[in-house]
Amino acid sequence: MPDVKPTPDPDPPPTQAMANPDETVAQVPDSPPTEEQGNPEQTRAQAHDVLSAVLANRDSTRVQEPDAPSTRALPLGGIMATSAGAPSQMTMVRAGGKLIVPGYELLESVGKGGMGIVYRAKQIALDRDIALKFLREDYHPRSGTGLRFLEEAKITAQLQHPGIPAVHEVGTLPDGRPYLAMKLIRGRTLDTMLKEQGPGSTKWLSVFEAMCQAVGFAHTHGVIHRDLKPANVMVGAFGEVQVMDWGLAKVLGRESTLPDGDDFDSPADEDVLVQSSRGSESIETRAGSYLGTPAFMAPEQATGATTQFGPRTDVFGLGAVLCTLLTGKPPYMGGNAETTRLMAAEVKQVEAYERLEACGADPDLIDLCKRCLEGDPKKRPADGAVVARQVASLRSYAEERA
């Protein structure tokens, strides 16, 4: 076999990745000389083994093209997609236990969801605070969850609306996990504010109207959210409303590479449908066969009837949010995630209707909420824009009477 001498890049630090993603130099620790090393035949065999290891390691770390994410970890730096679509190399290291992403300074963790972890970070080049959202380490980058994380970025980036957070950049970490650089929303979730201030039609109607407008805008672009709830709505310090977490969003009329059923992977092989938050009544979105949050699910979601998914599926979610804003509780409240899902599948709304009738809100607003919560999608308003116009009309009428 001809001699092959791998050539490293000039003076690379021994613990960092090489600059060329297609070349890796295997570092073999020095071993003390032994008598066996004097045997020429054994020496050639050892050299052959080392060379094979070098070539194998090089092949295993080869970065694929940007449009085909690698199924392996990327120890040499991943592909970072810019707004112009041109890939560039980036690396991520840890200094003193702190995560460092070139171009950004991570400041603090501000949230954790079913798929991702969000940090407040400073974008160094523009000297501005942004939000960096990473795929959780529980999930493989090529899992259904990892692919849906990237799908969220692509969908959200195309929905340019004041009520939908802007995506600045999509990138890939060296371990293969994707991340999003997004607009940082300074405020609190509608869920938190509702718990602090309590329900009521007058105090939340303008927030709900803005939420409907954002969702209606997405509907006009053929996108449905599929996980509308107060926890996914942010209210800023100046009253701006943002519909967050488009991780379950679906583009209608387009073939998807993701199935609508078991396209998530539970961390640590944990076969769980949904997860309760520290034993509380709030049931969070989770990996499983039924996508969404059971307490706010349309029946077609709760039964997995994907052929019925459309803007009216989100309209049900809007009705469920309105029900929560008026009564303080979502339409469905089972003892656990599965019983709640079954309530949604069977459209058991007697208790929800009783709470709506007793909430004291304007009868026309209650009627709108009930129409949004219809079990038959055809009986609901057509989309979020229709709901927004009806809410605006009711709010204008209430202001005239005040």
Image: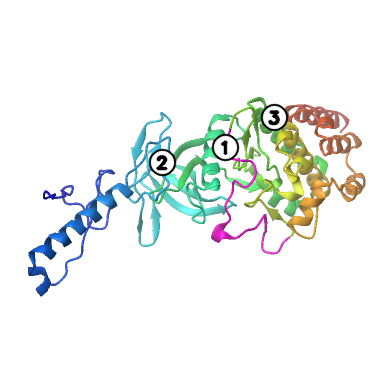
Give the image location of residue 186, x and y in percent: 57, 45
Magenta stretch holds residue 258: yes
Query: In the image, what residue type sits under mark 3?
Result: Gly
Specify which label sits upstream in the sequence, 1 or 2: 2
Q: Secondary structure at mark 1?
A: loop
Asked if marks 1 and 2 touch (Cβ < 8 Å), the reply is no
Q: Residue at x 34, y 44 (%)?
A: 90
Decide if residue 64 is in sight here.
Answer: yes
Q: Nearer the viewer, residue 194 or 9?
A: 9
The scheme the figure's colours follow is: rainbow
**Residue under circle 1?**
165
Viewer-side label of 1, 2: 1
Q: Residue at x 89, y 36 (%)?
A: 367
**Residue under circle 2?**
127
Residue 216, label in figure: 3
Residue 149, label in figure: none
Magenta stretch, main secondary structure, is loop
- Compared with 122, 337 (above or below) is below
Give the image location of residue 116, x and y in percent: 54, 50
Q: Residue at x 79, y 31 (%)?
A: 391
Q: Quadrant of residue 170?
A: top left
Q: Residue at x 74, y 38 (%)?
A: 208
**Which portion, as a residue range, is magenta?**
256-280
Viewer-side label of 2, 3: 3
Q: Is residue 362 left or right of residue 300?
A: right
